[in-house]
Amino acid sequence: MIDQRIEKIYSTLKAEVISERDANLQLIKAEQLIFYCWKNYPLRFSDADLDSILEKQMIESECLDNRKNNHIVYVASTLFAIGGHTRCILNFIDNLPNYEHTVILTRQNKSIPDNIFESLKEKNVDVVILNTKNSILEKSSEIISKLNSNCPSKVYLFQHPDDLVPLMAFGKNKTYNVFHYNHADHVYTLGMRYFHKVLEFRNSGALISHFGKSISNSQIQVLPIQNNYETPNRSESKSKLGFDSTKRIVGTLTNFGKAQSLHGMPNLVNVITELSVKYADLNFVIIGLTEQEFSKIAGESMPIPKNIHCLGIVKNPEPYYETFDFFLEPFPVGSGLGIVEACKHGAIPVFAPQQAHLCSTYEVFHNEIQKLLIQATTFDTYFSTIENYFNSNCSEIIVLSEKIKSGIHKHHRGEKWVEQLDNAALVFEPSETIDAASYLKNEALFFQAYQKKSTHELIEHLLSLKELVSKKTLLTLFIGSNRVFSIFNLNKQNTKRLAIKFIKS
């Protein structure tokens, strides 16, 4: 294993889960294990042994026949003022006005943010906040009780990976059609195979679910976005919000937790600060981050450049998306929905380095515009790629912007999303949708650059991913003319040794 310490901790935590005899404590320890794996990248995506243990505690409920076909329930861990899960739920509701909607929250420790609460209230959405002091099984029982009283036709899960309440409620419950929205690719998850269907945002997520979590019913589902496509003139939109209409705007969407450094990588605040100094004629707009939060990440002593605008929480980001010429994907934690919403208005997306391997498999974009997307595999190329676009003339930017906007409108508008919601033809076929070579090469670049591992450890890492692609593909990467290891200048003897090790593994 690459990191014996991580593996040892994992084994210890797993043993504690298995040996625990108290039902509630066992689930709490299982959540702690998931959280650890979520944050420490243990080179595994699920655990069948733990699935079987948890299955014994799943709640069974009697089957009801009087389901309401126009009622949808969303089960989420929390709602934030800005967040992918929150925006997805709101966009579901906006795009399905003829349905009744209920939102059930399992971990809402604080009150729902005002902007979200007002939006739900306006749409007559029933909101149920479970008592966070109750046990996992108590909250699961409460969910089933609520559902049995209103009998929805569908349930969509937007929980955090370490939230076991939905799994305990629906793992054995076949009464309702339960769809799990998988919003993060490299996430250790328990019990996904028990749900009716797993919906993916990206082909890379579907790849991991299919091979790493034994999910045979995975389906790519484009992200639901707001259903208005009458995009005003960008210059007019800038003027309306008080920006200089002659200056390009580089926008992004994040929050304080997601904008901080991870594993020593540069963060969004660092990058935007550096760019703002070099490109004083551009405006940089950050939705979701206040000036105080920006300063705390950048360093209290550093004044915020005048061309950086921290907007904090924005009730409706659409008017600001209309002003963006570029959209920088936030990092270390990306924002898939933010990218799609900004691209709807013609913003040109710039993917962060650790997300670069997702570009060619980013299913929210159609093949027609995938080739237009900016790809970068290191922070050096990230900066140079951004600068190339910043320095492009206006006519080139306008043409590219219109192509991206028309592609989103054609394939991912709200009406199209509603049509595809129950389309069985969208079943994921991994052999047809994954560029394994690109996936592994970017995985290697990211791993060596930001996990600070040796070449030997890197090889072990790539070997551990062999279950995600075919042996033929990996063997080609080892010994083919375009092998991934050429980027590390391995000699012929070492390459042969590694190929033999792979074959035997």
Image: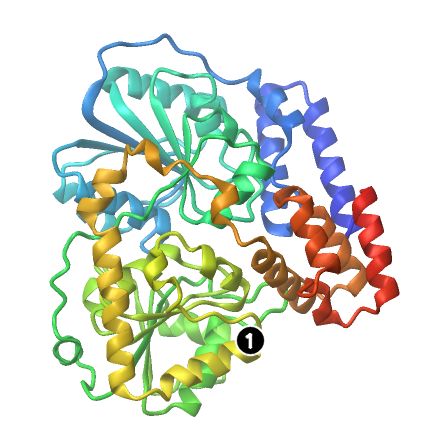
x and y percent of residue 431 in the render? Answer: 52, 43
Residue drawn at the location 80% of the way across and 53% of the way down: 499
Task: Out of 432 and 407, give the one closest to the viewer.
Answer: 432
Which color scheme is applied? rainbow
Q: Residue furthest front?
A: 481
Q: Is residue 134 visible?
A: no
x and y percent of residue 417 in the render? Answer: 24, 44
The residue that label 1 is drawn on is 379
Residue drawn at the location 21% of the way across and 45% of the way down: 416
**Which quarter of the figure has residue 64?**
top left
x and y percent of residue 110 in the render? Answer: 37, 45
Left or right side of 234 for 215: right
Left or right side of 410 for 292: right
Left or right side of 318 for 451: right
**Which quarter of the figure has residue 387?**
bottom left
Residue drawn at the location 34% of the way across and 61% of the way down: 339
Left or right side of 149 for 122: left
From this view, report whether residue 5 is shown above or below residue 249: above
Task: Indicate the quadrant containing the C terminus: top left, top right, bottom left or bottom right.
Answer: top right
Task: Out of 461 and 72, give the one closest to the viewer.
Answer: 461
Q: Is residue 88 visible?
A: yes
Residue drawn at the location 58% of the way across and 27% of the way down: 27
x and y percent of residue 334 in the render? Answer: 45, 60
From this view, report whether residue 210 is shown above or below residue 372: above
| Residue type (three-letter) at the residue carrying disc 1 | Phe
